[in-house]
Image (cartoon, rainbow, N blue to C red):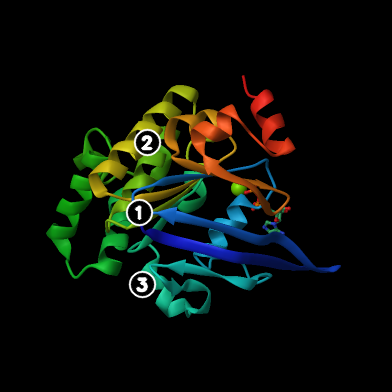
Amino acid sequence: MSNILEVNGLTTQFETKNGPLTVVDDVHFSLKKGEVLGIVGESGCGKSVTSLSILQLLDKHGKVSSGEVLYKNTNLVSKTEKEMRKIRGKEISMIFQDPMTSLNPVLTIGTQIGEVIEKHEKIKGTQVKQKVVELLNLVGIPRANEIFHEYPHRLSGGMKQRVMIAMAIACKPTMLIADEPTTALDVTIQAQILDLLRSLKEDLEMSILLITHDLGVVAEMCDRVVVMYAGQVVETTDTRTLLRNPRHPYTVGLIQSTP
Ligand code: ADP
Ligand code: MG
């Protein structure tokens, strides 16, 4: 299988009062076409900063200080913001843990998903609306024609996450980064969202980088896993091997502490 993404020696620093702080430290991994690659590790180990570094979405205090992010063999680290805007949403999409931080409370669901489509495709008006309703149906939102006109606060957490997924897949991206997509949800809803991601991955032939701190999610979803600890990759292996024969002391502890 060929690699969609290769992260080589990625190092990300934040400027702090006490000087530069390295939070992602010489990270290497690759995502193969059609694969679900898990990134696991405890809170604060650098999972989200890794994904934000891939998409060049760090805030003004953060920067990739060395390394490269090869997406289809081009280095995203050297791309301009204008070039990245064409890649985000169209080539690589991202969904986050908390839909409320990424959905706009003053715009209807239909408007928000429509904006994503209009950014990347040359269609307008009723064609956009039709596409949004199709997407809402695809991600399992009932009464899509009504939900189109609703504002985010009217939806449950699980429905909001489905809307986020609809936005992320609106332009059929090659790759999806899902940063703890089920952490904020009830357990039964978690399972539904994971099922949805799995079926979309098959239908759209997406490659997924799935960030989680939950080994149950890893066991269910991932082909291979990267384990991070304190900003570094400490283990990269296929999921079965990781669960049966973990090598790094942190991974051993993680598995022992999982019910
Ligand atoms: P994870 O997603 O694994 O829980 P993060 O990637 O969010 O962890 O954070 C990794 C480290 O980087 C943490 O110590 C966090 O405090 C720090 N960090 C994250 N974002 C910023 C920021 N914008 N400015 C300064 N430090 C940050
Ligand atoms: Mg995080």
Q: Quadrant of the C terminus?
A: top right
Residue 20 or 252: which is nearer the viewer? 252
Residue type marked 3: Lys
Disc marking residue 143 = none
Disc marking residue 1 = 1
Q: Relative to residue 65, is residue 157 depicted above or below?
A: above
Nearer the observer, disc 2 or disc 1? 1
Q: Distance between the Cα atoms at labels 2 and 1?
A: 34 Å
Residue 180 or 214: which is nearer the viewer? 214
Query: Of the residues under marks 1 and 3, which one precedes in the sequence?
Result: 1
Residue at image position (48%, 72%) is 76
Q: CB of mark 2 within 8 Å of CB of mark 1?
A: no
Please tell me whether mark 1 sits on a helix, a strand or a loop: loop
Q: Which residue is mark 3?
A: 86
Q: Is residue 79 left or right of residue 72?
A: right
Q: Does mark 2's beta carbon lie closer than 8 Å to ligand 2?
A: no
Residue at image position (25%, 46%) is 148
Q: Which residue is mark 2?
A: 159
Residue 33 or 194: which is nearer the viewer? 33
The crowding category of the residue bearing disc 1, from other C-alpha atoms within 10 Å (few below 14, some 14 to 19, many at least 20), is few
User: Residue 103, can we see it?
Assistant: no
Query: Of the residues under marks 2 and 1, which one precedes in the sequence?
Result: 1
Q: Is residue 94 left or right of residue 137?
A: right
